[in-house]
Every structure is written in C-alpha cells, then in structure tokens.
C-alpha cells in the first residue's frame, strides 16, 4: 500500500510541474481536465489556455472598471 501512495505522490508532483507553454491546445485541455477544480494549478492552466487566443473585442479600462466594447 505504501508503494501505491508513493507513486501517487510522484505522479501528482509531476502533474503540477507540467510545462504548459510547451503543450498543444489539445494537450492543455486534457491536462486541465486532470486537475482538481479550484486548485491554483487548474486556474493557472485555464488562464494560460484563454490567453493563447485573445478576444477580438477591444477591452477599455476606465474609472468604472473594465468593459468590453463591441464594434
């Protein structure tokens, strides 16, 4: 039983150290599905995925905060 726990610990550690920038979009999608929802690793992977394909809508920052302006 101890060997299994050690292997799981090693696998989880390796998953946290994944090279997100080197992954393709499909690989990153698969990686995101393996992460625990709400974990810092999950948020980092999702943000990296979203930032790969920026929005076509311009974002305007002002005193009221941030809003998207449709053309």
Image (tube, helix red, strand yellow):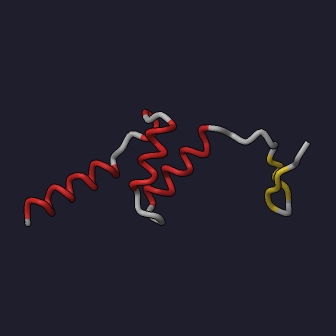
| Percent x, y of residue 33 | 44, 53
Is 28 above or below relative to 34? above
> Going by the image, does 38 lie left or right of 11?
right
How many numbered callouts? Answer: 0
User: Which image quarter is the C terminus in?
Assistant: top right
Residue at (45% x, 60% y) in the render = 40
The quarter of the rendered structure image containing the N terminus is: bottom left
Q: Is residue 66 left or right of residue 17?
A: right
**Left or right side of 46 for 10:** left
The image position of residue 17, as x and y in percent, is: 33, 47
Q: Residue furthest left?
A: 2
Q: Position of residue 54 (x, y in %)?
A: 68, 40
Question: 37 and 40: which one is in front?
Answer: 37
Residue 42: image location, x then y, percent: 46, 56
Residue occupying the point 60% across, 46% down: 50
**Residue at point 44%, 39% (across, down):** 27
Residue 69 vertical position relative to residue 53 in the rendered view, above or below: below
Answer with the quarter of the image where residue 64 lies. bottom right
Give the camera-side residue of 51 and 37.
Answer: 37
């Amino acid at each position: 039983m101890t060997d299994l726990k050690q292997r799981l610990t090693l696998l989880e550690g390796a998953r946290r150290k994944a090279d997100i920038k080197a992954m393709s979009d499909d690989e990153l999608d698969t990686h995101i599905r393996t992460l625990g929802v709400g974990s810092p690793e999950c948020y980092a992977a999702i943000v990296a995925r979203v930032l790969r394909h920026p929005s076509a809508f311009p974002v305007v920052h002002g005193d009221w905060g941030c809003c998207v302006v449709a053309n």
